[in-house]
Image (cartoon, rainbow, N blue to C red):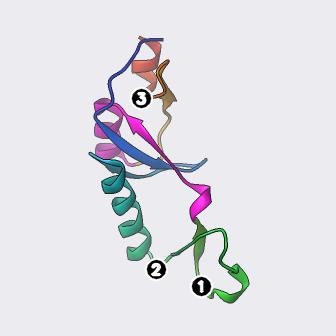
Amino acid sequence: MATIDPTGYIVHNNEAIVGIGPTADAAWEDFTRGLESEDVTLLDDDADSSDVLGDWTRESDYAIRSASAALLAQVETAGGNCAWRTSSNGVACTRAEADA
């Protein structure tokens, strides 16, 4: 597996990539904007979910990692419900990049 240079960041959980950006902060902001547009509340681990009405998710269910330009472009074009891998140096990348 090749070493891949990161050009941005993704926010992801076990199901999908839910935010992208040129910096970790920008990717997190993209993620939280998406939650706000769907009226989903983001809770930290100390919040008591039984007190929250409506849709919510836990902050700890999401991670930020550096990503390749190709993966960021793939998410921008096709959305975050896509297959991806991690390169030998820990950068999130497309399957094609990982297989090269």
Residue 16's place in the image compared with 32, above or below, is: above
Residue shown at 39% from the left, 58% from the top: 28
Residue 82's place in the image compared with 96, above or below, is: below
Query: Secondary structure under badge 2?
Result: loop
Give the x, y percent position of residue 52.
63, 86
Quadrant of res 9: top left
Residue shown at 67% from the left, 73% from the top: 46
Give the x, y percent position of residue 24.
36, 49
The tag earlier along the polypeptide, 2 or 1, is 2
Q: Which residue is mark 1?
A: 54
Q: Is residue 12 left or right of residue 66?
A: right
- The amino acid type, in three-letter code, at marker 2 is Asp
Which residue is more in the foreground, 57 or 65? 65
Residue shown at 50% from the left, 76% from the top: 40
Q: Write the start and end of the magenta stretch as one range.
A: 59-79
Query: Can you tell which mark lies on residue 26?
Result: none
- The amino acid type, in three-letter code, at marker 3 is Cys
Residue shown at 61% from the left, 57% from the top: 61
Query: Can you tell which mark lies on residue 93?
Result: 3
Residue 71's place in the image compared with 99, above or below, is: below
